[in-house]
Amino acid sequence: MTEGSLPPVRRPLPDETTLERELFEAGRRLADALPGTARNPIAAADDKAMALASQDAELKAALFRFVDVVPACRSLDDLARHLTGFLGEVEAPPPPVAVAMRMGNTRAGRTALGAAAAAGVKHMAHRFIVGESPKAALGTLRELWKDGVASSVDLLGEATVTQAEAQRYAERCDTALDALATAARGWPERPALERDSAGPLARANLSVKVSALTPLLRPDAPERGKRDAADRMRGLLRRARDLDAHLHIDMESLDSRDAVLELVLELLAEDEFRAGPSAGMVLQAYLRDSPQMLDTVLDWTTGAGAARERPLTVRLVKGAYWDHEVVEAAQHGWSAPVFEVKADSDRNFEQLTRRLLDARPALRVAIASHNLRSIAHAIAYDHLSGGDGTDLELQVLRGLGDPLQHAIAAQGLRVRTYCPVGDLVAGMAYLVRRLLENTSNDSFLADQAKGIPLEQLLAPPAVGAGR
Ligand SMILES: Cc1cc2nc3c(=O)[nH]c(=O)nc-3n(C[C@H](O)[C@H](O)[C@H](O)COP(=O)(O)OP(=O)(O)OC[C@H]3O[C@@H](n4cnc5c(N)ncnc54)[C@H](O)[C@@H]3O)c2cc1C
């Protein structure tokens, strides 16, 4: 480390009773800081489709299939035909859905229904996507920053299947880094977002996906995909270093996990990136072998990566591809690589949170979750082990964590919101993933929306309310 003050002296590790007490207080402070309607984010978001869908698996499946075909529809009539077609598969539709299906019987009704459906999908997409281009997103990013919320921009794109698409994605990332870094220079000072005990933190922050940087990332030939992605990734790392921006590499499904991890650790250990840029990767706590992956990263910090001047940021998430991993494993007759009981993912998330926080200052830690218990656990553990929040970053997703980002900022803690940028078509896969997650029976946000009391929401995973 070259800059910054010394990290705080660590206290002896807390006992579980003290930790639970502190965690409950931190969770209650956050819950109290949420605006009234936001304690029930799904119902408050006025998209009743989501609330309805979460109660009815068949309806949910029909709506997801519908959301998928929206970008391909040529007219409002066409859109309504698809909607009534999908809804027609639901055996006992709830009353609002039955009304929609009756409207689909006439051409005028179909046009009206199509317009309402198109507006509904757009409205929902705009909740999760900050703008159609990085330039269009700059106003929102500046407002967030002014409110004490940092951001990481994610450029949505369709699956990369050709070299030309991969090249185009790399160029879009390059342009976005430039636009973000230039605009961020004019943002007002926000000390909590700009410095930790390891030194300055970049204002401009971009999240990228390796699968979009190469069409060759396949589990059966990982070296080819890695080599192909490496050239484009090097270009982005150079650009981020020159602009003093942070580059974060997202994690996707397990079939690319090892290649992505190796690629990131190998590139960042290269001499030319010793002094920068600031960079990060993602650890997925739903994976049973995630503790071993953390061992690999920690070994790297004392081995090949030891000479780096900026600590690697590790963003801890639960993982966004749970259904995919379970189905993929079942199809091959493999045992699932992910935990199958939600409480197991939650417990592992807490264990990894502790190991990551204990590993500072070799790493920078970002805890990404909308689950009050998971967040409060990180805040409490940091505090009881001698931290004052400076070396803990909390991260949320745009659209799911909007009220939470303000509640976290109001505590003086550093929060970063992951902000997807792109058009509706590019955003569909992202939107469907968020909707799936949000309406799942195992989702914290769905539990919160049901009005489950805070004591239960903050209870330890093993004895939580069926979670
Ligand atoms: C800033 C940010 C960046 C992110 N980046 C990535 C990324 O790069 N890669 C990525 O994969 N995800 C990423 N995610 C998404 C993340 O993995 C989660 O999907 C999402 O945050 C929901 O988890 P939660 O803690 O908010 O909610 P919770 O409701 O507490 O947890 C939901 C999660 O629990 C897990 N789960 C659900 N059901 C079960 C079950 N039956 N058994 C075991 N586990 C189960 C799943 O992972 C599910 O997403 C990111 C999230 C944020 C906030």
Image (cartoon, rainbow, N blue to C red):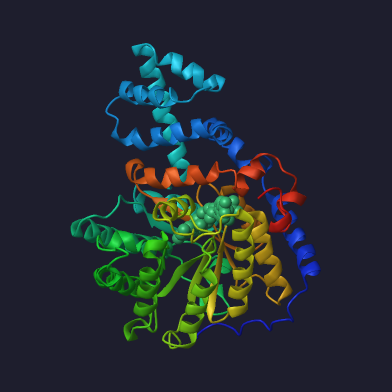
Residue displayed at 41% across by 59% down: 253
Q: Nearer the viewer, residue 221 or 212?
A: 221
Q: Position of residue 120 (x, y in %)?
A: 45, 31
Q: Quadrant of residue 167?
A: bottom left
* Image vertical order of residue 7 relative to residue 250, above or below: below
* Image vertical order of residue 82 relative to residue 183, above or below: above
Q: Could you tell whether 388 is left or right of 273 in the image?
A: right
Q: Position of residue 295 (x, y in %)?
A: 52, 78
Residue displayed at 77% across by 59% down: 25
Q: Is residue 235 visible?
A: yes
* Number of numbered discs on residues: 0
* Image vertical order of residue 277 relative to residue 400, above or below: below
Q: Nearer the viewer, residue 295 or 154?
A: 295
* Image vertical order of residue 163 relative to residue 121, above or below: below
Q: Nearer the viewer, residue 61 or 102?
A: 61
Q: Position of residue 465 (x, y in %)?
A: 71, 48
Q: Is residue 147 visible?
A: no
